Image: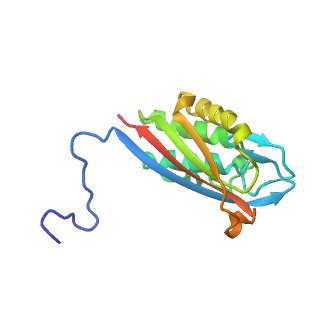
Amino acid sequence: MTSSSPRPGSTIAPRGSSVPLRAGIGYDIHRRAEGRRLVLGGVVFESSWGLEGHSDADVLLHAIGDALLGAAALGDLGRHFPPGEARWKDVSSLELVRRIRALLAQRGARVVNVDATVVAEAPALAPQRQAMCVNIALALEIDVSCVSVKATTNETLGALGRGEGIAAWAVAMVETP
């Protein structure tokens, strides 16, 4: 260890008084559940199946929520909305994202943008992409031009490729005071 290396357990303060922009990454995956509503980006898709989960299981919004919490170093979705708590049963994930935005605002932070990718063999997201972006932008109180939702398949490889579930990745940028 050199003299400029931190000691174990120590922290390094950033240069200057603050780091104004911070990025966070989120990931979520839910398995397919027959007879349940399919909700992605706050949009209900016509489908005979949905995703298994305690809330509405909106994998896209869960990944975005984790990215936002990560950017602010506030933990993860499970810390703030424990899946064992009855009050979060079947709750709209748009409400969870609104609460995360409010939590950031309490700390003087604001969402700059989010970029997310949904990995699924079905359904086709393109017809609902704009509605998902609008829902996310409204929940985060940002312009819709600051929200990107993309989709890809898993090329029929693995569990996602067999349609056994849906996953999502998200990156969020947050401006801090």
Q: Is residue 74 visible?
A: no
Residue 5: where, in percent of width, then height?
A: 19, 64
Q: Which residue lies furthest to the bottom in this view?
A: 1
- Residue 92 location, x and y as percent? 71, 42
Q: Which residue lies furthest to the front in this view?
A: 155
- The picture quadrant where one finds residue 133 is top right
Give the residue at the far left of this rendering: 3
> On the rendered image, what quadrant is the N terminus found in?
bottom left
Q: Residue at x 54, y 27 (%)?
A: 143
Q: Position of residue 56 (x, y in %)?
A: 73, 48
In the rendered image, the vertical position of residue 175 relative to residue 52, given as above or below = above
Q: Give the x, y percent position of residue 153.
A: 67, 57
Front one among 68 and 99? 68
Asked if residue 176 is positioned above or below residue 123 in the image, the reply reads above
**Residue located 61% across and 36% down the image:** 136
Q: In this view, does 170 lie to the left or right of 33?
A: left
| Left or right: where 102 falls relative to 96 | left
Q: Which colour scheme is used?
A: rainbow
* Residue 83 in view here: yes
Q: Quadrant of residue 40?
A: top right
Residue at image location 39% in from the left, 44% down from the top: 22
Quadrant including the C terminus: top left
Q: Which residue is drawn at 29% across and 65% down?
A: 9
Of 98 and 143, the residue lying toward us: 143
